Amino acid sequence: MHSLLKPRWMSALLLGLLILFFWQPEAATLAAGIALFIMGMRHLEDGFRAFTGGALERWLARCTNRLWKSLLFGVVSTALVQSSTLVTLLSIAFLSAGLMSLMAGIGIVFGANLGTTTGAWLLAVVGLKVDLAAVAMPMLVFGGILGRRGEAYWKGVGQVMLGIGFLFLGIDLMKDGFTSFQGILDPERYQISGWLGVVVYTLFGLLATVVMQSSHATLMITLAALATGQLDYANALAMAIGANLGTAVTSALGAVASNQAGRRLGVAHVLFNLMTGAVALAALPLLTRSVDWTAELIGIAADAYTLKLALFHTLFNVLGLVIMLPLTPLLLKALMRWLPDPTPAVGPEGADLALSEQPRTRALYLNDSAMLHADTALKVLGQELLHLATLSRKVVASALYLPPDIHQGMSREQLHAQLQRPVPGEQREDADALYERHVKGVYGDIVDFISRLDISLLPEQQQALMDDNLAARDLVEAVKAAKHLQTNLRRQIDSPQEAVREAYGQLREQCGLALIELARLADLEIDSPAREALFARYEAEDNLFAEHFQALVQRLLRERLLDGWQATSLLNDLHYMLRIRRHLHLAHAVLYDGLSAELEASAERIEPSLSLS
């Protein structure tokens, strides 16, 4: 697929199409119809993204707490945006970020498959009997006008109208393109009967869906060809099955770049489509008779093949749901067994490995599927920043030789007692190496993700993205400040001068208290007053400690327990400790309290003010 898009192949493909259009002008009309239909779907998706503005997240939260709700959400959302691929990839992204359960994701993708049938019914009932070009023209005009508006809502409405207009115009051109082939091509030459025809046209439908990245487009082509007599009814049924199988390939490609949770959903979608396709192929004669019987029951004429194709497409997707829904609990267990969560690396006797011995860390939640929608992109970015915050706190703790269990609910008294003991050699890890191993890669992935985020954002989403970007930078700055502080700490932690050892012990303790407080934020996530009180106490402690420590250094200098060089070093390291606390505070305020990163500009900067003259 990627090799096809290389410049030399693209040039050859375009040249081949140009020759085909001159040789067979009717093919240009058909190809233009397909291109407009795909363009319409893209505009429809863009419109959907443009004016949801957080609604997608709220809908998912309300619609994914029950399997039947998730199923209904998949049906309705796919019917609205006419893209099961978009809905499936968004579900993979949300599941990857831990924003919904695997059961909910399975319900959505199962429902999305059923939702694809609405497009076939729309075209079969209305599209082939109405002059869609006449409807499309005003839609394109109004959509073009509204799409140029600056307001996100009206721009979204304009994109939706453009999308519908291009869809209708594309369908109309496809009809004209296939109609123009009448008298030029003999359809009977391309009809393949028996199981050979089923296999060939199933593969053709699958390939068309993979190339166009849209089962809707394949179904529209199939219906238009069937309506104009260019495709046999039996072969059209096989193409519909192939179109369903093709969507599984798209979701599988999207799941590959995801984490284990996203891969599980991708595998579930592939299994559903394979099972549905296999059952439809195995029971094709029975399904065909069921379509004939149902069509007669609801008043569809025996020769209304487009309506019967839409009915067939619905029936075999419903059959897939009937088969797979009872198996969902077993499927969940199988997916967890096939694709288990990675187990943390442990040392001898089950002890956690030191950070320096753990595998190199990269982003857990970021994936290309999340870039399809602004809400999804911001959500997975927020999850990744929480991951980076946890890593940053661990690296800061290791850089300052703090106890390994400081992140496990340690009290202030326990921390103070621990810091009175000598630091064992295995606890003295190199901050530079830890930064390279556990922070730099994740931060690089975040920067790369943000740089490739080219979807339209509402003003509040742009602000959130800027806040997240600054929060990531603050976390990295905190780690870098810890690296600087470790330079002197490494030399002075075993100093023969008790005053120096105790001073560095106070700096380490104050930083450890910050880590203990910030680690509690996850437990206070729904308690806004408690979070506000925590941040207020945090800032007050910064001011009090800065004053206390500067007074301590001045007293020790006056009593000749420190020389000028040692006092200067301690004040510089006080500055680095305050930078660690300040940058961690700014980042966590954005991540947990939703405060704007403009806080950074207004935050009081505490600097050592001791004069040595």
Image (cartoon, rainbow, N blue to C red):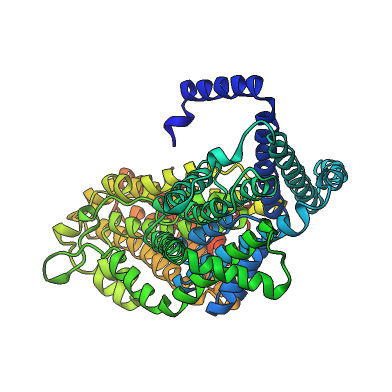
Query: Looking at the picture, how far across and down is residue 182, in whole percent?
Result: 69, 36
Judge by depth and name the residue closer to the eye, 288 or 93: 288
Establish if 221 lies above or below 26.
below
Establish if 353 lies above or below 168.
below
Judge by depth and name the residue closer to the eye, 607 or 4: 4
Q: Residue furthest left?
A: 348
- Left/right placement of residue 428 relative to residue 535 reads left
Q: State which quarter of the image contains the N terminus.
A: top left
The image quadrant that residue 26 belongs to is top right
Residue beneath the point at 60% across and 40% down: 187
> Is residue 306 visible to the viewer in this orientation of the structure?
yes
Judge by depth and name the residue closer to the eye, 381 or 439: 381
Count of marks overlaid on the render = 0
Residue beneath the point at 42% across and 54% down: 255
Query: Looking at the picture, how far across and down is residue 342, in whole percent?
Result: 29, 63
> Is residue 474 visible to the viewer in this orientation of the structure?
no
- Left/right placement of residue 134 relative to residue 207 reads right
The image quadrant that residue 420 belongs to is bottom left
- Left/right placement of residue 605 relative to residue 220 reads left
Query: Looking at the picture, how far across and down is residue 70, in whole percent?
Result: 56, 73
Residue beneath the point at 88% across and 45% down: 138
Judge by depth and name the residue closer to the eye, 529 or 170: 170
Query: Looking at the picture, how far across and down is residue 608, in whole percent?
Result: 47, 50
Q: State which quarter of the image contains the C terminus.
A: top left
Establish if 104 lies above or below 367.
below
The image quadrant that residue 427 belongs to is bottom left
